[in-house]
Amino acid sequence: MRILIIGQLPKEIGGNYTTGAANVVYELSKQREDGVLYYTYGTNITDSAAIKASSFLYQYIGYKFRPFSMLLTALCHPLDIFRHMMHYHTVDHQSILRFAFYEANIREAIKRVQPDLIHVNSIANVSPVRFAIGKSKIPMLLTCHGIFYRGDEKDVVNRDRNLGNIKLADAYSGLTLESLNEYESILGIPKNRVAVIPNGVDCKKFYYSPEARAKIRKEFDVKDGCKVFITVASVQERKGQLVFLKMLSMLDIDFRYWIVGKGPDEEVILQYVEENGLQGKVRMLGYKAANELYKYYSAADIYAHSSWKEGQALSELEANATGLRTIINKVIVGTIASDVTSPDYYILDFEHVDFEELKKWVLQEQSDRASRTTFDWRIIASQYAKLYQKILKSK
């Protein structure tokens, strides 16, 4: 079964930038399970970089300028191209030339791979993929890594992009149970047409290491009784690091808070730390490579998932794989793939914090911490393989 994935790719293999969705696409592209062979068209990687990253022909495909093929297509199918351009302008609200460029490159990727199914990882990519497919019968699966249009009629651009493109796909998947409701109530796709498959984690990279725990805690001079909280995310208001720190500073416990990531809220947090005498308790660790992160997760005691808006955070899954207990902002509890009723989770209502209850949960000892493999990418890839087979049978 030949699957062509459409999505972003991370910097580590040549992408122009890295996002959570890019890491998901990359991890899925590396799987070799259940007779599935993945080919990936990266919307943010040059074809030369994609070729360099490939271990077999067309494993990764990137973009390049194709003026002659674009011109030839326009001459042979002028009405179709006009219709596509009108869609890009009135529905996608994007540059006509840029989306025509995407369409030409995706058409070339389809020609090279001859896929049985195309797996699109953003609604923003749906229209150029649909137009590149043309009259062929290749089914398209759309995975939304978060539905950020909330049904506001005044949000004209997002309304048109989402509602104008959603029915161009043939099948749908989301990451969380929450996404089922969003697909139906916001995008008009019935729940019975949507599969729920969470993101995965590379359990060879993310695991609990007692040795790394001891080394990092010694390096940072953290005593045994001190509780270390960690958040791994871009440092911005939406991710909630500052709000969590303010709450934490009122908890009356010996704590450290490690913030991994970069972003616009760094200066605001540092100013709060300075003004409140928290210099010894808060560490801004900046960016850490994926192959280093397990050490910091291992050294911490509790993952602070303080975000106010998420699709499904890879960092929470990584923390889970290293055996961490987790505090979740109540407003995103529906994005969590694990059982949040487990004693390893605490649901925090920032508007009504019960400090005594929270303190009691935080100070509990976790004597049997171990790595978890529940969401290993091999397991997630197997779920996708079953979904691909189901879609192909229905077609």
Image (cartoon, rainbow, N blue to C red):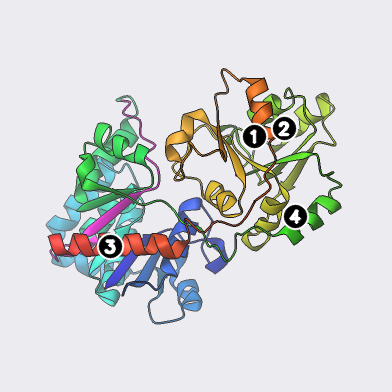
Disc 4 versus disc 1: nearer the observer: 4
What's the mark number on residue 269?
2
**Could you say where residue 20 lies in the image, as x and y percent from the top left?**
50, 51
Quadrant of the image containing the C terminus: bottom left
Circle 1 — which element? helix
Disc 1 versus disc 2: nearer the observer: 1
The span from disc 4 to disc 3 (Cα, nearest Å) is 38 Å
- The 10 Å Cα crowd at callout 1, few under 14, some 14 to 19, many 20 or more, is many
Q: Is the magenta stretch mostly helix, strand or loop?
A: loop
Q: Mark 4 points at which residue?
A: 213
Name the side, left or right, on which 158 lies relative to 237.
left
Q: Residue placed farthest to the top in the image?
A: 352
Residue occupying the point 12% across, 63% down: 135
Amino acid type, callout 2: Ile
What's the mark number on residue 191?
none
Question: Contact (CB < 8 A) between labels 3 and 2?
Answer: no
Name the side, left or right, on which 223 lies relative to 175.
right
Question: Contact (CB < 8 A) between labels 4 and 3?
Answer: no
Question: Contact (CB < 8 A) between labels 1 and 2?
Answer: yes
* Image: 388 above or below 319: below
Nearer-N-terminus badge (2/4) = 4
The span from disc 3 to disc 2 (Cα, nearest Å) is 45 Å
Nearer-N-terminus badge (3/2) = 2
**Could you say where residue 33 lies in the image, as x and y percent from the top left?**
37, 72
The span from disc 4 to disc 1 (Cα, nearest Å) is 23 Å
Circle 2 — which element? helix
Amino acid type, callout 1: Gln
141 drawn magenta: yes
Question: Contact (CB < 8 A) between labels 4 and 1?
Answer: no
Circle 4 — which element? helix
- The 10 Å Cα crowd at callout 2, few under 14, some 14 to 19, many 20 or more, is many
* Image: 129 above or below 195: below
